[in-house]
Amino acid sequence: MRFSKKSARLLLISIFIFVAGCASEPRQLTQAELEDPNRSIVFGYFDMQDASTKLDEVSIKQYSSSPLYFSAGIKDGMFFRFYLLPGSYQVDTFTGASGIFGGDTTRYHYGSEGRNDTAIHIQKPGVYFLGAYRYVKHDQGWFKNDKFEMKPIQSPSERELLQKLIVIVEGYGNSVPTRMKLDMLKKRLAELRN
């Protein structure tokens, strides 16, 4: 069977999109993986008050020979991801919707070339705070894309966000993985009180 150049190009693009999609979000975890004590929790906060969008999605990148991307849960500016194995991670991109019906989506690239302020290296299981940041817009004038930076902020604190994350996880029920997450979060909260 012969392909025209156009058909061959479309086939290659389709394969690329399929492979990229498979590499973007790892597969569903097994019960054993959900109960694996070697996994960690990461969380942080973005204040998007000065942005034209609210925070709808955060992508966390794991650096390796074949980078992986993990979607984070979002709640009132806080983002969080459970079950991460040891390795190097950072926020890669985040998105927000705007417009009357939320149909306009903006993807912000948070320094995906090299390391940014959210970069961490997980060596042992635990709870890791990526920081709290405020979106600061730098207007570039008419017909130019605006630039931005993420400035560290002191509030909400790691402790305040941990308390909110505990409430969220308590709503997940009483499964073994949920109890394990709660134990980890409460242990970290106790460390911050001392």
Image: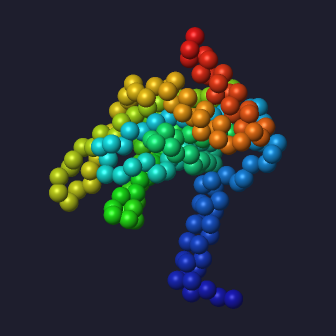
Q: Position of residue 79 (x, y in %)?
A: 52, 41
Q: Position of residue 126 (x, y in %)?
A: 66, 27
Nearer the observer, 119 or 162: 162
Task: Inspect this view and state whether residue 65 appears.
Answer: yes
Total numbered labels placed on residues in the image: 0
User: As drawn, is 39 to the left or to the right of 72?
Assistant: right
Task: Check the image and tell me how it is coloured.
Answer: rainbow
Q: Is residue 80 above or below residue 26?
A: above
**Residue at x-position 59% and y-position 35%:** 167
**Residue at x-position 59% and y-position 22%:** 189
Q: Position of residue 28 (x, y in %)?
A: 72, 53
Nearer the observer, 186 or 114: 186
**Residue at x-position 51% and y-position 30%:** 161
**Residue at x-position 42% and y-position 43%:** 110
Task: Inspect this view and state whether residue 87 appears.
Answer: no
Q: Farthest residue to the right: give it.
A: 32
Q: Quadrant of residue 149?
A: top left
**Quarter that holds the C terminus:** top right
Q: Farthest residue to the bottom: give it.
A: 1
User: As drawn, is 150 to the left or to the right of 142?
Assistant: right
Q: Is residue 160 above or below residue 45?
A: above
**Quarter that holds the N terminus:** bottom right
Q: Position of residue 156 (x, y in %)?
A: 43, 29
Q: Farthest residue to the top: give it.
A: 194
